[in-house]
Amino acid sequence: MTRRDLPSVDRLLQVVRAEADPTWPGALLREAVRAELDDLRGRLQAGEEREAAPPEALLRTLAEQVIARITTELRPSLRPVINATGVIIQTNLGRAPLSAAARAAMHAVAPGYSNLEYDLVDGKRGSRNVHLETLLTRLTGAEAALAVNNNAAAVYLALLALAAGREVIVSRGQAVEIGGGFRIPDVLRQSGATLVEVGTTNRTYARDYDAAITERTAMLLRVHSSNFRLVGFVHEASLAELATVAQAHGVPLVDDLGSGTLLPTAPFGLAPEPMVQESIAAGADLVTFSGDKLLGGPQAGLLVGRAALIAQLRRHPLARALRLDKTTIAGLEATLRSYVRGQALDEIPVWQMISAPLPRLQARAEALAAALQAAGIAASVTPCRSAIGGGSLPGETLASVGVAVLPGPVGAEVLMQRLRLGEPAVIARINDEQLFFDLRTVGEDETDALVTRLRDAS
Ligand SMILES: *Cc1c(COP(=O)(O)O)cnc(C)c1O
C-alpha cells in the first residue's frame, strides 16, 4: 500500500461521522481524521510495509482508529488507580486516599454556595480560616493555625514572612532535599533569607545554634530529615534544647515536620514519627506539616503556633496566593474532626492501612488468590512488607501479606503494562518475573475489580 491509496480527509470524515457519537463536535472529528491520516502517511513514507486493502475496508479500519483516537482523547487524564505496591503514602499515586467523611464533606459543598467566607451568626463577611483553626489548635495545643496549599508552601510562606532579608540558622545535617526539587537551601534563597549552616553533617549541638545567633538572625529552623536516616556517630539538638536557645535570644523556632503525625506510630511497631502536639509542647513557635501525609487528608500545608506569628503570615500578600479552596477545606475539616472524635484510626484510610491486622490481610490475600486460581491464574499467597512512604519513616516497614501472580506467556512486563492501561489502572510490583500485589494498600471494595482486571489482562 502506498500514500496514494489513502482516502481524502473529507471521504474518511464522512464515514467517521456516520459511526461517531453524534454529540462530538465536527472540529474534533476533522482534527482526529487529519491526525490519523498524517500518522499513517508518515509511517508509509518512513518505509512501513502495509498490505493493500480494498478502499471500503481501508475506510472502515481507519474510521475505527479515528474513533478510538477520539475516545482516548476524551478519557480523563487523571483517573483512579488500584495501588497494590504496599506503599501507603505514595506521592506518585496521589498520597492519602480520603475518608468517607472527607469525601462526603467535599461533595456537600462542591455543587452550591457555602459559608466559606461568611459568618452565618452575624450575617456578614467571615474568614475561610475559621473552619480549620479551632480544630487545629485543639488537636495540637497551639495558639493559632493557618492552612495553605501544601507544606512546601507553608515553609516558603514562613520564611518569606518572617525571615526575608535576614538569616535563618539550620543544622548542616538538615539542609536537605525533600524530593521533587524541594531543597531547603534553595527555598531559603528564594524567600530572600540567608542560610546560616551550623554544626557538621553528622553532629550538631544546641551550642552551635547559640554561637551563630546575631542581630541578623530571623529564626532557627529545624527540618525533619523525612526521607533518609543518618545512623552511627550522629547527634542533633533536641527541640527542647533549641527552644531554650531561641527563647534566650528572642528568636522564633520553626519546626518543619514534613509529615508530622497526630497519632503515635510506635503502637504499630514503627519508629516514632514526630508528633505535632509534641513539637508545640517542646517549645516550637511554629510547626509546619502536610495535610496529605500521615494526617491522611487532602493536599494542604498546615502551620500551627504562636498567634502573633500566624497573624504575620496571614497578613503577608502571598498568603492569598497559597490559600485553600472550599472543597479542600471541607475535606480537611472532616479529616480533623475524625481525630477530635477519637475515630481517626477507624475512619482515615492511611491509619486503617497502618493498623490493618495481619490475620485480616492474610484472609483477604487467601480469598484473592482463590478467586484468581478459579479464573485460571497461577496465584499464591506470600508474606511481604509494606512501606509508609511520603517521606515519613524511611526504612520502616510493616509485615504484610500479598499475592504473587505468575504471568502466562505474555510475561510480567507486558501484563503489568496491560494492568496499568485498563480501567481501573492497577499498579503492582514485579519481583523475579512475578507480579506482586500487597493487600494492605488495596481497598476491600477494590478486590473484585482487581480479579476482573487480571483475568482480562492475562
Ligand atoms: C514532604 C515534606 C515537605 C513538603 O511537603 P508537601 O506537602 O509535599 O508540599 C517539606 N518538608 C519536609 C520535611 C517534608 O517531609
Image: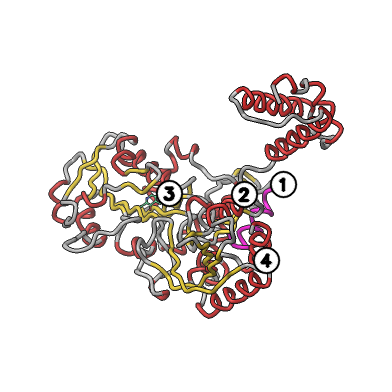
Instruction: Count neighbours of disc 4 (C-alpha within 10 A) and say few if under 14, some if 14 to 19, many if 20 or more.
Output: few
Assign the magenta stretch its main secondary structure: helix
Q: Which residue is mark 4?
A: 448
Q: Nearer the viewer, mark 1 or mark 2?
A: 2
Q: Secondary structure at mark 4?
A: helix
Is 101 part of what is drawn in magenta?
A: yes
Q: Amino acid at mark 2?
A: Leu
CB contact under 8 Å: marks 1 and 2: no
Residue 91 lies, with reference to residue 438, above or below; the image says above
- Label number found at residue 241: none
Task: Quadrant for the N terminus, please.
Answer: top right
Q: Secondary structure at mark 1?
A: loop
What sort of colour scheme is used for the picture? secondary structure
Q: Is mark 3 within 8 Å of ligand 1?
A: yes
Q: Is residue 344 visible?
A: no
| Magenta residue span | 98-112
Q: CA distance from mark 2 to mark 3?
A: 32 Å
Q: CA distance from mark 1 to mark 2?
A: 35 Å
Q: CA distance from mark 3 to mark 1?
A: 28 Å
Please state the horizontal and vertical placement of residue 32, each as a whole percent of the image: 71, 29
- Label number found at residue 151: 3
Q: Nearer the viewer, mark 2 or mark 3?
A: 2
Q: Nearer the viewer, mark 4 or mark 2?
A: 2
Q: Which residue is mark 1?
A: 112
CB contact under 8 Å: marks 4 and 3: no
Please state the horizontal and vertical placement of residue 324, each as a whole percent of the image: 54, 45
Q: Amino acid at mark 1?
A: Gly
Q: CA distance from mark 4 to mark 3?
A: 36 Å
Q: Name the residue at 62% across, 29% down.
A: 48
Q: CA distance from mark 1 to mark 4?
A: 34 Å
